[in-house]
Amino acid sequence: MSEREFKLLQMLTHGLTSAEMGSRINRSVKGVDAGRAWLSTRLDAHSAADLTRLAVEFFKTRNPHTASVQALATLRPRSPVSALRSPLSVMRDA
């Protein structure tokens, strides 16, 4: 999981909208929505509420300043599509 995806997950716990998240990480709303969709697929979250619940569960047991990207991978098993490149990494490379 990239740092940007990790930050998106952190911002989900604060209840920010896609527009607010985008302005904080300098991405469009469409880019943020693509990142959220990718996180949902990667973490096997079946809805926005499920993704938010996973994020809250993860960060309530860890200090958000010291939580690691690698620790997040322990929440759910990776789906087979996790080998694909994230839409956010594609945007970053462009």
Image: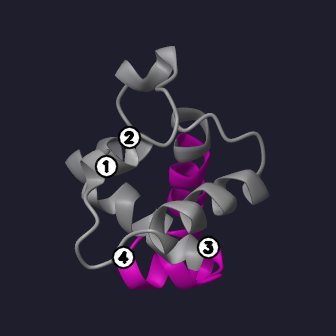
Quadrant hosting residue 3: bottom left
Looking at the rendered structure, the kind of residue marked 2 is Ala
Which residue, given by chain and number where applicable, does mark 1 sit on? 71
Q: Is residue 14 left or right of residue 52?
A: left
The tag on residue 25 is 4
Crowd band around label 2 with a 10 angstrom C-alpha radius: few (<14), some (14–19), many (20+) = few
- Above or below, 40 against 54 in this view is above
Disc 3 to disc 2, how far (Cα)? 23 Å
Look at the numbered disc 2 and give the secondary structure of its residue. Answer: loop
Secondary structure character of the magenta stretch overall: helix
**Which residue is located at x 55 percent, y 38 percent?**
43
Q: Find disc 3 in the rendering and name its residue.
A: 18
Looking at numbered disc 3 in the image, what kind of residue is underneath it?
Ser
Find disc 2 in the rendering and name its residue.
73
22 or 72: nearer the eye? 72
Provide the secondary structure element on which disc 1 rests.
helix
* Residue at the image point whose x is 57% and y is 75% from the top: 13
Mark 1: amino acid? Ala
